[in-house]
Image (cartoon, rainbow, N blue to C red):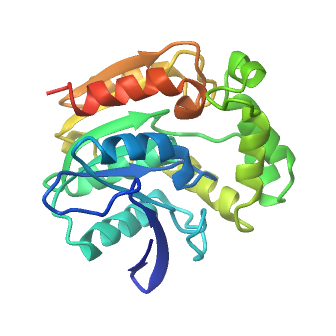
């Protein structure tokens, strides 16, 4: 469905069920160059497990036609405005990669809003290589090769990850290429420029679970482990034989970790 957020259209997926304010709200936030389809399986599962699920296409991504933003605070503003427009008073947030930064920014700013954080492929700071930024800025297809290559484990590229009959590497390239011009560069810039002075980690007071992949070359597990130690209520779960694109590479193991973090983790 489409929702008006600050005068701009936001495409929103709800896991195939109607949004119900009487159920706890769960928001999935995708990473740079992705869209709501990244979370499709997880969203359907939790929408049938007692949650009202919201999965927005961030500005410039997927079906949201407005231009991509170039800062993490701006993305956080957008998601906060989306929740306000739907009268959501509290929500658990699940973020991947850039989405993990957006979720942390939201939790630090409005601790009474965010009941729980689950962060996949997280690092802070989240530096992006000059080569990738230059390629994305030039709209060079080599940017898609770099994200698809470094974003997945070798075994996943050979076996197709969770995509029966499909090719994970090719599918990621297609996903990245279909974004609007400037989207990938702006989103990667948002990650790269979000530095230590931008986020007050001590203000994140909710239970925070980092789901890390043991073969993640983009945001190595050590980054999340260090973050977890800095948070008042941080912990980690590990998915084996997996790279940065956890839900696409090891769908079942990642889903079990999400279930543990959100349902079994009290």
Quadrant showing the N terminus = bottom left
Where residue 9 sits in the image (x, y, percent)?
49, 79
Is 203 on the left or on the right of 70, as rendered?
Answer: left
Question: Which residue is more in the foreground, 25 or 236?
Answer: 25
Residue displayed at 37% across by 40% down: 45
Residue displayed at 30% across by 44% down: 48
Where residue 10 sits in the image (x, y, percent)?
47, 73
Against 121, is 5 above or below? below
Residue 211 sits in quarter:
top left
Question: Which residue is more in the foreground, 67 or 166?
Answer: 166
Residue displayed at 36% across by 19% down: 237
Q: In this rendering, does residue 130 appear at all?
A: no
Question: Which residue is more in the foreground, 266 or 146?
Answer: 266
Against 254, is 190 above or below? below
Residue 181 sits in quarter:
bottom right
Quadrant showing the C terminus = top left
Where residue 88 sits in the image (x, y, percent)?
20, 65
Is 261 on the left or on the right of 232, as rendered?
Answer: right
């Amino acid at each position: 469905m489409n929702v008006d957020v600050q005068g701009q259209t936001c495409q929103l997926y709800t896991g195939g069920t109607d949004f119900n304010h009487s159920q706890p709200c769960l928001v999935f936030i995708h990473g740079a160059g992705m869209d709501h389809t990244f979370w499709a399986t997880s969203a359907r599962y939790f929408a049938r497990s007692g949650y009202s699920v919201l999965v927005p296409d961030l500005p410039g991504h997927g079906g949201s036609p407005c231009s991509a933003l170039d800062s993490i605070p701006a993305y956080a503003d957008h998601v906060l405005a989306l929740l306000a427009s739907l009268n959501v008073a509290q929500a658990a947030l699940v973020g991947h990669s850039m989405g993990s930064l957006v979720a942390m920014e939201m939790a630090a700013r409005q601790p009474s809003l965010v009941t729980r954080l689950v962060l996949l492929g997280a690092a802070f700071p989240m530096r992006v290589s000059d080569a990738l930024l230059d390629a994305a800025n030039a709209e060079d297809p080599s940017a898609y090769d770099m994200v698809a290559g470094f974003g997945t484990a070798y075994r996943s590229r050979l076996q197709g990850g969770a995509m029966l009959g499909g090719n994970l590497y090719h599918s990621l390239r297609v996903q990245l290429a279909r974004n609007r011009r400037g989207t990938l560069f702006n989103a990667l810039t948002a990650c790269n420029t979000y530095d230590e002075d931008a986020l007050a980690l001590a203000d994140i007071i909710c239970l925070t679970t980092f789901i890390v992949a043991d073969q993640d070359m983009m945001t190595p597990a050590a980054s999340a482990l260090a973050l977890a130690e800095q948070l008042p209520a941080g912990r980690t779960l590990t998915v084996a034989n997996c790279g940065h694109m956890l839900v696409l590479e090891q769908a079942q193991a990642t889903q079990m970790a999400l279930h543990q973090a959100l349902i079994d983790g009290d």
